[in-house]
Image: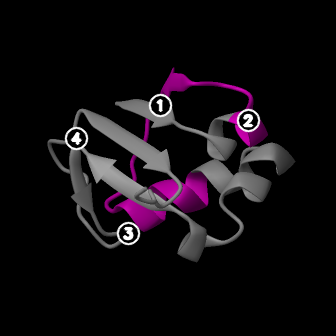
Amino acid sequence: MDVLYFAWVRERIGLPREQVDTQAATVADLIEELRAREDRYAAAFEDLSALRVALDQDLSDFDAPLKGVREVAFFPPMTGG
């Protein structure tokens, strides 16, 4: 699946997107797989309260299943103004 990173998440990881081959059942499982890769991923996913996730461009939760999902995007909360 395609995994996209936006704003400071992209800055910490150093990539805007990547293709990930995963066996993760949920978003939380995917995050654990990514955290285990390298320190830069661990830093990006250190505080999940500072992150949001979208699955196939729909806002979702970290416990959401990944079955059938083609794209996962991680980004900080958006503010209005």
Q: Residue furthest front?
A: 81
Element at badge 1? Answer: loop
**Reading the chain from its start, which is encountered first: label 2 or label 4?**
2
The label number, if any, that marks residue 20 in the structure image: 1
Element at badge 3? Answer: loop
Q: Is residue 19 above or below residue 53?
A: above
Residue assigned mark 2 = 11
Quarter assignment of residue 22: top left
Q: Nearer the viewer, residue 2 or 51?
A: 51
Question: Does the magenta portion include 42?
Answer: no
Disc 2 marks a residue whose amino acid type is Glu
Q: Please give the range of residues in magenta.
A: 11-33
Q: Which residue does the image show at 47% across and 31% down from the upper left?
A: 20
Q: Which residue does the image show at 45% across and 60% down from the upper left?
A: 79
Question: Does the magenta portion include 20?
Answer: yes
The CA distance from mark 1 to mark 2 is 18 Å
Q: How many other residues sit within 10 Å of disc 4, few (<14), some (14-19) or many (≥20)?
A: few
Quarter assignment of residue 9: top right
Contact? badges 1 and 3 (CB < 8 Å):
no
Query: Looking at the picture, how far across and down is residue 16, in whole percent?
Result: 57, 24
**Reading the chain from its start, which is encountered first: label 1 or label 4?**
1
Contact? badges 2 and 4 (CB < 8 Å):
no
Element at badge 2? Answer: helix
Give the label, 1 or 3, closer to the camera.
3
Residue assigned mark 4 = 57
The CA distance from mark 1 to mark 3 is 17 Å
